[in-house]
Image (spheres, rainbow, N blue to C red):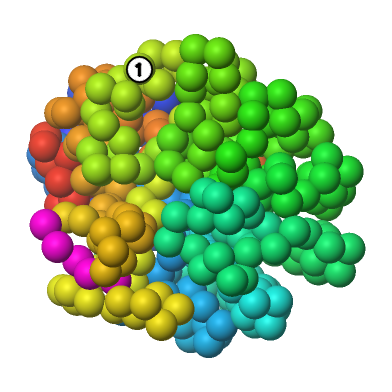
């Protein structure tokens, strides 16, 4: 069956193509060509923006489920499906600091999801437990610990068996040699939940770390004499995930960061089980998380993830921060795809690729998706 979508602006992952039609045959993009040259058969006029299905490299849950020690193949299916309903074509389900047993369970579920080719499953993100308790955020400090030899061996094996594995760690809790070994095994090492100084951060990046987790949150900040982890990233070329809800990072600071780094910053939702549901409360390691006024917090007010979708994040960047639409859209598609090595299959619209497409309104709200 052929569909010919006309009338919308087409964002191909790098630029807008105006006056073009997107031709879909079955589940594959057959062509992107001027509307005047498009087939008459199967035409459908749509209004808005056609863009690649978004990619989210940090989702703690969705559809009412968290990624935790009980996660299995069925749970990953449900979480991925919830995000596909929100316009996110692919995700890295994210386990925050937990026990070694919970980590092993989630990795086993991820390998099963890989074998089953679960729609939307790109791999896993393990955020902890090798962090700095001084920057714990909502993580359980009782489970935070340095990386040992057994931990390293298990993570390297997971990296070899998963399509993508991101590991968030603090340089205080892992050596440069361990970071290099993880990178050599294929993991994307991301620095986060760290109080390290600038030089320590630069050493970790030199060892193979490639990005930071939720820029500015749970990390040493920029001082004029002590640039910290945030300064190491903004003065270098590492990638950085950004929670663009206007709560985790003020719009003015987002504007400064994006001016400092024209490339490499990508959007993440850092969402919880609330995503795709009307839930107002949930449990996180026995602690209550409250959903109020677009904010997720523990009872003491500590931020606990974000109540955010990627279309909302794109809209916030454009309307609140003043970022060009094509850059905001790339930050949710082609930039994260490149970071985890999936640029040849995800994050762009091109002939021969799978039809993983979202239709956004002129306000960037999700209207429809072909996933």
Q: Residue at x 57, y 27 (%)?
A: 228
Label total for image: 1
What range is drawn magenta here?
289-293
Quarter holding the C terminus? bottom left
Residue 361 in sight from this viewpoint = yes
Task: Please name whichever residue, 346 or 150, is drawn nearer the observer in this view of the structure.
Answer: 150
* Percent x, y of residue 29: 41, 46
Picture coordinates of residue 206, whole percent (x, y): 78, 28
Foreground of the two, 179 or 354: 179
Residue 223 vertical placement versus 139 (above, below): above
| Residue under the image location 82 percent in, 45 percent down | 175
Any magenta on residue 58?
no
Q: Residues within 10 Å of mark 1 (few under 14, many from 20)?
A: few
Q: Quadrant of the N terminus?
A: bottom left
**Residue 370's quadrant in the figure?**
bottom left
Assign a secondary structure to mark 1: helix
Q: Residue at x 48, y 74 (%)?
A: 67
Residue at the spot of label 1 = 256
Residue 292 belongs to magenta span: yes
Q: Position of residue 52 (x, y in %)?
A: 37, 43
Say which residue appears at 58% left-offset and 30% top-offset: 229
Relative to 292, residue 42 above or below: above
**Whole-percent x and y of residue 121?**
52, 65
Camera-nearest residue between 352 and 369: 369
């Amino acid at each position: 069956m052929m569909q010919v979508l006309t009338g919308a602006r087409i964002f191909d992952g790098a630029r807008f193509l105006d006056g073009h039609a997107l031709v879909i045959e079955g589940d594959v993009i057959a062509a992107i060509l001027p509307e005047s040259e498009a087939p008459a058969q199967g035409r459908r006029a749509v209004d808005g923006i056609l863009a690649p299905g978004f990619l989210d490299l940090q989702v703690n849950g969705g559809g009412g489920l968290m990624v935790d020690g009980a996660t299995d193949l069925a749970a990953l299916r449900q979480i991925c499906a919830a995000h596909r309903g929100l316009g996110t074509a692919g995700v890295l389900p994210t386990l925050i600091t937990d026990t070694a047993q919970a980590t092993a369970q989630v990795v086993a579920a991820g390998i099963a999801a890989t074998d089953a080719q679960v729609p939307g499953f790109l791999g896993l993100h393990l955020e902890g437990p090798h962090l700095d308790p001084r920057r714990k955020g909502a993580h359980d400090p009782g489970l935070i610990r340095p990386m040992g030899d057994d931990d390293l061996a298990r993570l390297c094996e997971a990296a070899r068996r998963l399509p993508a594995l991101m590991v968030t760690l603090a340089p205080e809790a892992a050596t440069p040699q361990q970071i290099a070994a993880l990178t050599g095994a294929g993991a994307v090492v991301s620095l986060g939940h760290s109080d390290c100084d600038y030089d320590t951060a630069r050493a970790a990046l030199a060892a193979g770390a490639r990005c930071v987790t939720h820029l500015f949150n749970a990390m040493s900040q920029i001082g004029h004499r002590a640039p910290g982890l945030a300064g190491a990233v903004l003065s270098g070329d590492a990638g950085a995930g950004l929670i663009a809800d206007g709560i985790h990072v003020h719009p003015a600071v987002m504007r400064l960061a994006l001016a400092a780094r024209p490339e490499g910053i990508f959007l993440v939702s850092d969402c919880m089980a609330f995503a795709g549901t009307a839930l107002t409360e949930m449990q996180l390691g026995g602690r209550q998380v409250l959903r109020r006024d677009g904010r997720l917090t523990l009872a003491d007010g500590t931020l606990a993830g974000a109540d955010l979708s990627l279309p909302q994040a794109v809209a916030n960047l454009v309307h609140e921060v003043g970022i060009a639409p094509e850059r905001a859209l790339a930050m949710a598609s082609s930039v994260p795809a490149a970071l985890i090595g999936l640029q040849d299959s995800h994050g762009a619209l091109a002939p021969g690729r799978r039809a993983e497409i979202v239709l956004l309104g002129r306000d960037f709200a999700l209207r429809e998706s072909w996933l």
